[in-house]
Amino acid sequence: METTKYEITYIIRPDLDDAAKTALVERFDNLLKDNGAELINSKDWSKRRFAYEIGGFNEGIYHVITLNATNDEALNEFDRLSKINDSILRHMIVKRED
């Protein structure tokens, strides 16, 4: 089975306290692992201002995950749950070519 490298970037609401943010990141990291993905890196990037308002916020905390996946199961589940989670404002999944 071929492994493909992906990068997921998601934006967390800026008003979450540290404990809630840590719990959110752990939950989504574990979700990926539990569905067969191998996490290479999961780290906060920075808090940044938006060019336009998203969900009533002018800034958000960017988080970047690099991972290997052999199928789309983990990515599909991440996509599905991040769409219904109020703490994640936006997310993007990109296939890496390196």
Image (tube, grey):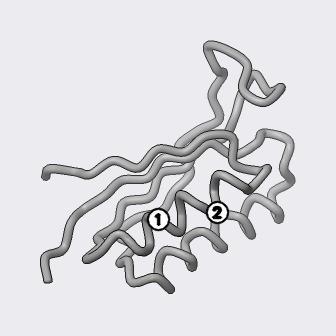
Q: Name the residue tied to disc 2.
A: 81
Q: Which mark is residue 65?
A: none
Q: Amino acid at mark 2?
A: Leu
Which residue is located at x 50 percent, y 86 percent? 34
Quadrant hosting residue 58: top right
Q: Amino acid at mark 1?
A: Asn
Q: Earlier in the sequence, mark 2 or mark 1?
A: 1
Vertical side of 51 occupied by 54: above or below: below
The residue tagged with tag 1: helix, strand or loop?
Answer: helix
Residue 15 location, x and y as percent? 86, 42
Q: Nearer the viewer, residue 28 or 16?
A: 28
Vertical side of 5 occupied by 2: above or below: below
Q: Is residue 84 left or right of residue 17?
A: left
Quadrant hosting residue 27: bottom right
Which residue is located at x 74 percent, y 56 percent? 85
Q: Nearer the viewer, residue 40 or 54?
A: 54
Graded by Cα atoms within 10 Å as few (under 14), some (14 to 19) or many (20 or more), the crowding at tag 2 reads few
Q: Name the residue tied to disc 1.
A: 76
The residue tagged with tag 2: helix, strand or loop?
Answer: helix
Q: Across the whole image, how many numbered discs are drawn on residues?
A: 2
Residue 68 location, x and y as percent? 29, 70
Which residue is located at x 79 percent, y 50 percent? 86
Residue 40 location, x and y as percent? 35, 69
User: Dots 2 and 1: beta carbons under 8 Å?
Assistant: no
Q: Nearer the viewer, residue 98 or 56?
A: 56
Which residue is located at x 54 percent, y 64 percent? 78
State the CA–CA distance, disc 2 to disc 1: 9 Å
Q: Is residue 51 left or right of residue 69?
A: right
Q: Nearer the viewer, residue 34 or 84?
A: 84
Quadrant hosting residue 18: bottom right
